[in-house]
């Protein structure tokens, strides 16, 4: 269920989570009320552009599933994306990327709850 601020702003990425990450990473001492929504909207727009370009690469290859290669090729073949990601280092395609725990706290809680429920069911 989307958060209230996400619903009000019409975003998929929750602005509250963005604010928590900004605060946890100590990226700024002070921030205005609207910065969470602005950053969330910017990240969502970037993701949309990147996925659209990756989908085009996927169609060129004649497959239906977007792979990491398609995302990387989309960045390389798009002038604006390649400029934005010019300092990025992409690992081997088969490597699993590192995902910061700050980004996925809800997933950890779900897994922990499932695990504890299984343990209770076994007893």
Image (cartoon, rainbow, N blue to C red):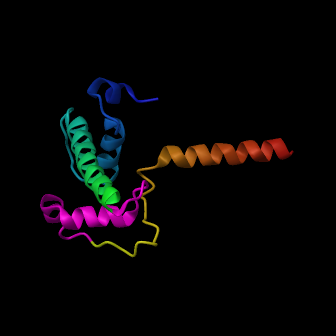
**Relative to the observer, which residue lies in front, 79 or 109?**
79
Image coordinates for residue 35, horizontal then vertical, percent? 20, 38
Indicate yes or no whether the magenta region holds residue 73.
yes
Q: Is residue 26 in view from this perspective?
A: no
Q: Which residues are magenta?
A: 61-88
Q: Residue at x 23, y 39 (%)?
A: 41
Which quadrant of the structure image shows residue 121? Answer: top right
Say which residue appears at 57% left-offset and 44% top-offset: 109
- Which residue is nearer to you in this view: 55 or 104? 55
Q: Magenta region's main secondary structure?
A: helix
Number of numbered discs overlaid on the protein picture: 0
Residue 64 falls inside the magenta stretch? yes
Quarter of the image with the C terminus in it = top right
Q: Residue 101 appears at what percent x and percent y?
A: 45, 55
Viewer-side residue, 78 vs 31: 78
Rendered image quadrant of residue 5: top left
The image position of residue 79, as x and y in percent, is 12, 62
* Residue 8 picture quarter: top left
x then y, percent, for residue 77: 19, 65
Left or right: where 83 falls relative to 43: left
Q: Which residue sits at x=34%, y=39%?
A: 13
Q: Nearer the viewer, residue 23 or 44?
A: 44
């Amino acid at each position: 269920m989307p958060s209230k601020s996400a619903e009000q702003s019409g975003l998929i990425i929750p602005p509250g989570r963005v604010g928590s990450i900004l605060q946890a990473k100590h990226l700024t001492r002070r921030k205005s009320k609207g910065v969470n929504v602005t950053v969330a909207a910017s990240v969502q727009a970037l993701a949309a552009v990147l996925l659209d370009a990756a989908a085009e690469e996927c169609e060129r290859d004649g497959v239906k599933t977007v792979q990491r290669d398609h995302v990387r090729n989309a960045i390389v073949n798009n002038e604006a994306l390649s400029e934005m990601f010019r300092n990025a280092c992409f690992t081997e395609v088969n490597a699993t990327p590192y995902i910061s725990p700050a980004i996925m706290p809800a997933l950890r809680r779900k897994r922990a709850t499932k695990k504890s429920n299984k343990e209770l069911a076994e007893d």
